[in-house]
Amino acid sequence: MGEKTHRPPVWLMRQAGRILPQYRALRSKLSGFKELVETPHLAAEVTIQPVDELGVDAAIMFSDILVIPEAMGLPYELIEKKGPFFPRTITNQADVDALLDGPEAANELSYVYDAIRIMKQELAGRVPLIGFAGAPWTILSYMIEGSGSKTFSKARRLLYTNPAMAHQLLTKITKSTIAYLKNQIAAGVNIVQVFDSWAGVLPPEMYNKFGLPYIQMICDAIDEVPVIVFAKDAWFAMDDICSLDCNVVGLDWHMEPEPFRAKHGTNKVVQGNLDPTILYADHSVIKQRTNDMIKQFGGHQIVNLGHGVYPDTPLDGVKCFVDTVKQYEFNKVV
Amino acid sequence: MGEKTHRPPVWLMRQAGRILPQYRALRSKLSGFKELVETPHLAAEVTIQPVDELGVDAAIMFSDILVIPEAMGLPYELIEKKGPFFPRTITNQADVDALLDGPEAANELSYVYDAIRIMKQELAGRVPLIGFAGAPWTILSYMIEGSGSKTFSKARRLLYTNPAMAHQLLTKITKSTIAYLKNQIAAGVNIVQVFDSWAGVLPPEMYNKFGLPYIQMICDAIDEVPVIVFAKDAWFAMDDICSLDCNVVGLDWHMEPEPFRAKHGTNKVVQGNLDPTILYADHSVIKQRTNDMIKQFGGHQIVNLGHGVYPDTPLDGVKCFVDTVKQYEFNKVV
């Protein structure tokens, strides 16, 4: 990473999934999403599909950030067309106290590490494998809310009504996440990404207290492989995120390349950040927007979308995006 | 507005609604939310409830931004616990062409103007009455998506796949909205607010093309009363929003008072912006946070939350917030 190449590397968040016909064919034969997550050879199969089909420069292990709350003691379900659901949530101190944490929680996830070993074997060095985990604030949000939410108001209010309990829960999640990422690395992942999907629901002051310090602990603890931090909608925290001990900063589609570089320089590689809805447009639009973005970031970039690819994105739009990056040449005027 | 007072004025977005027991009692007797919106004396009753119960400094008419798409030809439903739903949506040019617009659409909404006249009579000058409408981008989003959405990806993709149709639709919505606000003003509202609830889903470049110009047309057209513009999550557009021909800029809970004032000065009155989840906390926390915010904005502020009050907020938390503002004195150290 950070080496000079004639073009930037490219992969897509959520590339292993419903955009691929191979995935949909496999998925239709299974009882549900969790069977895919928990069956190592199937998780490996769908992880490698986009490498074969799209020619992306990295694989990202097929899994879900919610395996961590489950390993800590809160099982999750994935309800078709509705999203994640936790039959039990965290409502009081006893609930927090009852959670497993650290290696004890992480060691519950042997199916993930088994899957990684199969992925590495089947990739056979073709491209690097990316591991991942949710950031502690995002994981806490699900453990309190029990599902997605428009406002995450239950999780947010906990920070004002019981900050001590919030810090205890975040600490347990952080310890579990560090152990989980270290286990992923031991099993073979070459890089890890921390996703803070709900960073953007907090006021800056609260994110400074309850979000960033826990991401920092993770970054400080992981020195075996490069770390990507993607805190969606955390525009207000970019100075601090760019100061973390991580290698790559993920950007959502609100961050404009030139102002970003002017403000934050090139001390981090950036990852992102095309608006995923551009992939529904004519190929001429996809090509122009992709080329413009790469040019504006001026290198130091892992090309990606600014969010996970939307499941109904046309496959030929995704291919056009990947191919455009692969045909890019830094020294050529495009 | 803008006059020197010993304390700033205060009201809450969504103050007429489920936080009040009087509202819940009335609502439980009705067939649904739309009956309340469309029955002038009932809409007036719930508009005035928070003035009596909370002692806020303004009433906001009880209504919904989705009356405009309905007046243009797309009826909406409000499904309990799910939110708005449009049985028909805009899918092609013929759908756009078939929509009413301008005064023809706005004149469909006589129940709103009737309600305003009753509200004005019953308020009898106690406090000003705020009218409102959705911003054109937000209204387009609902007309394309047919409901709320985590990503509004259908609406966003239209801007890349058929920008000409998007501009036509936005133009029709804007003409209808201007006529609607002018009718509200003629019926008696003293100030109007434009809500761009989904401003934050667009990349800056697209918001500059498809969001702001239409808000600007509305601001330019309304010169009878002060205009408040609240574009939620549009941090990237604050320079442009502060340059609009409006009087007040609404801020969500991500905008920190001191950096905002340093960057944007005091050329606009700001409205906002306490994190609504603070109202669930202990009264000592509510008081301190509210006093700190007012002090940090240093005047030029209409105190409000950074978003609509959440429906399950404890009434005594809301009262504590309002009372704290009413006890504030600019020249006293708090």
Image (spheres, coloured by chain):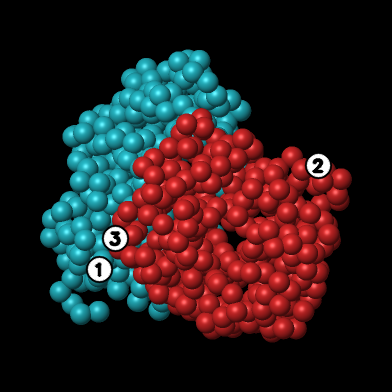
Chain colours: A red, B cyan
Q: Mark 2 is on which residue type?
A: Ala
Mark 2: secondary structure: helix
Q: As drawn, which residue projects farthest toward the left?
A: B4
Chain identifier of the residue bearing label 1 in the image: B
- Tell me the quadrant of the picture where the C terminus of chain B can be found: bottom left
Q: Which residue is mark 1?
A: B258
Give the vertical position of B35 relative to B288 (above or below): above
Q: Nearer the viewer, residue B273 or B330?
A: B273
Left or right position of B23 against B104: right
Coordinates of residue A173 in the picture (x, y in percent): 63, 77
Q: Nearer the viewer, residue B165 or B69?
A: B165
Coordinates of residue B46 in the picture (x, y in percent): 44, 45
Splitting the image into 4 quarters, where does residue A120 fall?
Answer: bottom right
Chain identifier of the residue bearing label 3 in the image: A
Which of the two discs, 1 and 2, sits closer to the camera? Answer: 2
Give the vertical position of A267 relative to A4 (above or below): below
Coordinates of residue B40 in the picture (x, y in percent): 43, 33
Q: Residue at x 38, y 69 (%)?
A: A267
Q: Between marks 3 and 1, how big is the CA–CA gap?
A: 23 Å
Do the numbered discs 3 and 1 sit on residues whose CB atoms are within 8 Å?
A: no
- Precedes in sequence: disc 3 or disc 2: 2
Q: Nearer the viewer, residue B289 or A322?
A: A322
**Quick check: do tags 3 and 2 share a chain?**
yes
**How crowded is the residue under tag 1: few (<14 C-alpha within 10 Å), some, or many (20+)?**
some
Q: Mark 3 is on which residue type?
A: Ala
Q: Nearer the viewer, residue B223 or B325?
A: B223
Q: Which residue is mark 2?
A: A25
Left or right position of B69 against A57: left
Q: Which residue is mark 3?
A: A262
Mark 1: secondary structure: helix
